[in-house]
Image: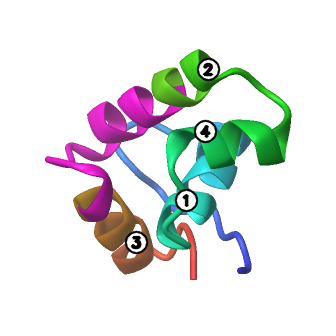
Amino acid sequence: MRVKKAETSQTLTDREIITLQYLAKGYENKEIADTIFVSTHTVKAHVSAILRKLNARNRTHAVYIAMKLKIID
């Protein structure tokens, strides 16, 4: 997946965008944590920040919004 930065109400960090890419692939928190070498707690924090910044209801909605805003492909 290609990463594009788009204007959002609050800019996502690079790690949050990477986390979004893995969410789009259907990865669970543990799989994301193992892949990017962080704890599951850190992934949960990234997901929470993503949901807040994108005003998303859940992970799937966050991916939808990110694709619509061209943050991820």
Q: Residues within 10 Å of mark 4 (few under 14, many from 20)?
A: some
Closer to us: mark 1 or mark 2? 1
**Is residue 46 or residue 34 the one in the foreground?**
34
Spot occupied by residue 40 in the image (x, y as percentages of width and height): 60, 25
Q: Does 17 sit left or right of 49 as displayed?
A: right
Residue that sits furthest to the right in the current view: 37
Secondary structure under the numbered disc 3 in the rendered image? loop
Q: Mark 4 or mark 2: name the one nearer the start of the chain.
A: 4
The amino acid marked with disc number 3 is Leu
Q: Which stretch is magenta?
A: 46-60
Q: Give the quadrant of residue 66.
A: bottom left
Closer to us: mark 1 or mark 3? 1
Q: Mark 1 or mark 3: name the one nearer the start of the chain.
A: 1
Find the distance from the CA under tag 1 to the CA under tag 3. 21 Å
Q: Quadrant of the N terminus?
A: bottom right
Residue 40 sits above or below residue 54 on the image? above
Q: Residues within 10 Å of mark 1 (few under 14, many from 20)?
A: some
Spot occupied by residue 24 in the image (x, y as percentages of width and height): 49, 70
Secondary structure under the numbered disc 1 in the rendered image? loop
Residue under circle 4?
Answer: 30
Report the colour scheme.
rainbow
Find the distance from the CA under tag 3 to the CA under tag 4. 26 Å
Q: State if disc 4 and disc 1 touch (CB < 8 Å).
A: no
Q: Which mark is residue 69?
A: 3
